[in-house]
Every structure is written in structure tokens, then in C-alpha cells.
Image: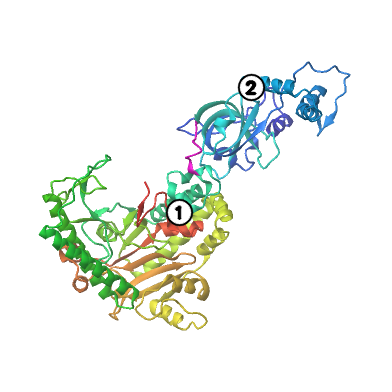
Amino acid sequence: MSSAHHMFDEMPKPNSTPTPMPPVDLSKYSKRVLLKTVLDRADGGVGLVDQRVVVGGWVKSSREMRKDPLPATQPPAAGDAKPVTGGKDVRCVEVFQSRIPFLRTIIKVFGGNTAHSHNKEKLESIGPKPAHPAISILQISDGSSTISLQVMVDSSIAPPSQLMPTGTCILAEGVLQKPSLQGKHVIELKAERLLHIGIVDQESYPLSKKGLPLARLRDCAHFRPRTTTVASVMKVRNGLNQASHTFFQNHGFIHVEVPIITATNTEGFSDVFQVSTSKHSTKEPKKEPPVSMDDTENISLETIKRSIVEKAKKVEELKRSDSNKEALDAAVQDLHKTNLLAAELEARLRSKSKSKSKSKTENIKMDDGFFSNQAFLTSSGSLHLESCASALGNVYAFGPRFQADKSESKKHLAEKWMVETEMAFSELEDAMNCAEDFLKFVSNSISENCYENLYFLSKRVDRTIIDRLNSLASTIFEKITYTTAVEVLNKVTDRTFETKIQWGVALTEEHESYLVDEFYNKPIIIYDLPKELKPFNVRLNDDGKTVAAFDVIIPKVGALIRGSQKEERLSHLTKRINELGLRKDQYEWYLDLRKQGTVKHSGFNVMFDVMVLFSTGLNDVRDAVPFPRHHGRVHN
């Protein structure tokens, strides 16, 4: 009898009718019990003993326990002797049967009738042997809890070979009971029937192997959420998502959707993905003869391609050197224009070719006439947010942003998720304060609402996760200018930085790490940065060299938030566009905001994927995203 029954027996009752225990809550849309409603209770589920439930999940691990075979003869009389072995009664006939193989071996050694023995063994092997009674002991998870439920399934219900492979999905109906075996579990399910079995091919199922590293799991992104580690990361990510929305909704921000497809290069100098239409087929492409290399236009195309190689080398050299941002931006724009020219020439060749197959490896028919002008995947929604802020006040957006940089950084993806804000009548100091409050709020929120997952990750990934989140939530951030940061770094004598620090150079991760982890030992906000390091629309300071921008640097991950006060003065913004050689026609709508009722405004962008890294202790952003897209690979 359960402890709950004992409790009811001891309480005075007006009549003899027992008080029924409340049933465990069902999942509203699947008619099963979520495992967290059983396992995440304060008592671990003990109070639910004797409840009949239906549970579902995937097998995380398993083992088989053989049941004692039934006796081959009638039970002995009451007065017969019962030798004790290991604390259990064993009948004489069972002891004799267990020694038969040993006796046969002795007979063979001492010259027994081996022919007769061989024939008898052969006869015994003929015909199917009955399945040995057994119990499958399964640890299953449905993703709702970091703890697995132990399920006992008798072989009369389903054979162990069908249930035990890792990844097998079951839907079982049974009764919750106290564990029948000693172990860490305080509750288990004794299955009475199985409503569903999803079998697994162990040879091809990637999670059949134990202890796969996160890097290996990236090759099977569609299965990796079934691991407890990745599932915990996804739940922390979900918690950060909810906390972000809650913070802005609580402070009067309005959530708006900004376009993913845009005609504007938001930052002015980043590489972008161009959008075109296509008719895609999964059929194997037909093999077509190559286009003749004697075509005069193709010779021109080859010349352009050689030029692209040279221009790309120049860009890389400028990135490695200490040259100013203006020169780098001009080189990037030049390379971008040359790429567009090459693409146009290739399109002309395709239209003249008899083949309608794009290439030997793709069966795509291009059709670039969908939009009236060039379109790109947006790298930032901040420009469109400014439009909404000029009418709605404080606004924010949350969604994917795209950059075509071929970076190998562990914090960069081609498709990244961003939280972006814009606040009307707000200046730089207001945006910095909002960013600090935001980080403290979300850190507190996931510490409270995702504690089980954080605790699991602290044991498997990084022991400092919870302390780091608590520290971020309770520490006052240090605010310093870029000039001060450079002065601090220049005074360092006990170490050498890989990149020489001087005014005007972007701070590297190494510089940022030293400032937050060693010098200030707390999160810092660096503001008033050189104008060459920031986008064209950031407000120019009175010194003419710096702009009203800031970066929030926190331990472990470095820069997490980048923000700024936007340039509301039409003349300054127009001049900046001309300096960078940007196409003015792309920004006419944006300049209209300065012509018609302009307002001072500021905001910031949160690199959401990097925030997941900070909160989970992971080191590579590809492990913090369900389906990462990065240079060289699109998994699914």
C-alpha cells in the first residue's frame, strides 16, 4: 500500500468510503501524461503510486532482466529440504538441471558414450526453443523533463529485442508503482499494454552510439534534439525567447515584424545574400554538353572572374592590415559590384544556351524578373524599425538575419537570430540603460524558470553557468569610452596581444576578454566608438571622429549587444552615404524619415544565439541553434 493510502487511513473519516487520490493531469491534446508532471514533482512522483496512466517517449537506455523459469516437476512436499542460495529457495531438481552441462563434460572426459551424448545434444537442438521469459527495463524520455521514467515491460507484451534499441518510441499504458529494483528511481511504470511501438534500425540510427560529442551531432541535426543535452539547450533557448518578449511587453514596447526580403543593404558594407526566383526539381539533372569556350562573351566572363580573385585578395589584405574602415568598405563595394557583373554575364550565357538546366549539379531554371529591382535577405531590421518607432514610440522585432561572410568564427552563422529595438525620443544613455536592464531581467528569468535544465547543463557542459547568470543579474555594468579601453589595453605589460591595439582599430575578442575577465572583472559597456567601425546611420559626435554607439561586453562570449543613437540630421546622414559610396536611391525612403517629422531615437541589437551560448556554457553557436546554417553547409 502506498504512503498516500496510509495517510488517508490515519485521518479521521466520517464514513468508511476511502477518499480517492486526484488523478495526474493529462496532456490536453494527446491524452497522455507528460513525464514532467510525474517526475518533476517535489516527491519525485511517489504520491502518484497506484495511478493508472498512459505515457509516451523514446528509449534512452535499456537492459533486460531474465525471469526465473517455471519448475519442470511438481513442487516438493512440505517436509522436503530447501537449500538456500543467495537468500532464495532453490529446489533440488533445479539444482540438478543447472549442473547437467557440467556433468556432461565430466562424462566426455572420462570416456562416456560420446556418440549417444552427441546424438542427444543434436536432438535437443532441433526445433525452435521457447523464448525465455524476461522483462525489458526501459528508461524513456518525452522531452518534458531531464529525468527519465523507468518502464517495466514483460516479454509477454512485447519482445525485448523490439523495445530495447535506443531511440525506440513507445506509448504505454500501465500503473505507477514503487521501484521493483534497487536504484536511483523512486517511481516506475509497470506496463500492462503498449499502444504504439516505433522501431529503430540500430545500424543506421546515429544515436545508437553512446556519448557522441556535440560536433558529431551536427551531422544529424534532425535527431540531436532527442539527446538530453541538446533538449536542455533548446529549452533554455525557449526560456530566453519568452523572457525577451516579456521584458519588452512589460515596458510598453510594441512587437512588429520587419521584412526578411529587402532592397536595402542595412549596414552598408556587409556581404549579403541576393534573392532570385527559381523552379526547383528533385529529379536528377540531364547531362548537357558544356557551353563552348570559344564564345567571346565567355572570354570576357573569364577576365571578370580573374578580376574577382584579385579583388578578393585585396579585401583580405585590408582586413588583416591596420587600414581604415573606409578603404575596406570601398574595396568590399568594388568586389560586390564585380560579382554582380559576373552574375549578369552568366545569366546572358544561360539564356543563349539551348540547355535549360542551370548546371550539372542543379536542376534550377532561373527567373530574375519577380522583383522590379535587386532584392536581398536582410542583415538587420533596424532601418525598418525606425519607421515604426517614428509612429508607435518604442518597438522591437525578433527574427532571423542573414550575412554572407565566410567567417569561421564560433559565434557566427549565415542565418542568425536577433532581438532588435528602437525607441523614439531616446538618446544614447537611455539605450545603454535599457540594454543593461534587459540582460539582467532575462538572466533572472531563466535562472528561475529553467533551473532543471541549467542544473543538468552545469554538470555536463559548464559548472559556472548558474553562478555566471546570477552575477550578471546582480552586477552594475561598468561604462567606459572606447578611448579609455584603448588606454587600458596599451598599459598592459605582462602579456602580448596578437593584434596590436591602437586608436581606430576594432577591439578583438582577446581585448574584450581581458577587459571583462581580468581588468574590470564585470560586464562593461564601451561607447563613443570610431565612426569607421560603425554603420553609416549612427549619430556623429561633436568631435567628428566618434559616433554615439556602444557595445555590451560580458564574460565568456564577449560582445553580446550592439547599439547606437541614430543620425536624425538629414545633412549629416546624406554626407555619410556619399562618403561610403552607397547607392542613394536605395535609401530615399529612409531619408524621408528625416525630412518629414524627424525625431531623436536610439536602439540596440541583441545577438540571440550568442546569448544562448552565454546561458548554456556552450562554445560553438552551431550547437545553440536547432538547424544551423553556415558557410559550406546547409544540413536540412
Q: Secondary structure at mark 2?
A: loop
Res. 216 in view? yes
- Report the residue marked by disc 2: 130
Q: Which of label 1 and label 2 is nearer to you?
A: 2
> Residue 470, position in %: x, y?
54, 61
Q: Main secondary structure of the magenta part?
A: loop
Label 1 sits on what residue type? Asp
Residue occupying the point 69% across, 41% down: 183
> Residue 434, position in %: x, y?
40, 64
Which stretch appears magenta? 198-206
Q: Is residue 207 above or below residue 511?
A: above
Q: How is this picture coloured?
A: rainbow
Which one is earlier in the sequence, the residue at label 1 or at label 2? Answer: 2
- Labels 1 and 2 touching (C-beta < 8 A): no
Quadrant location of the N terminus in the rendered image = top right
- Report the residue marked by disc 1: 623
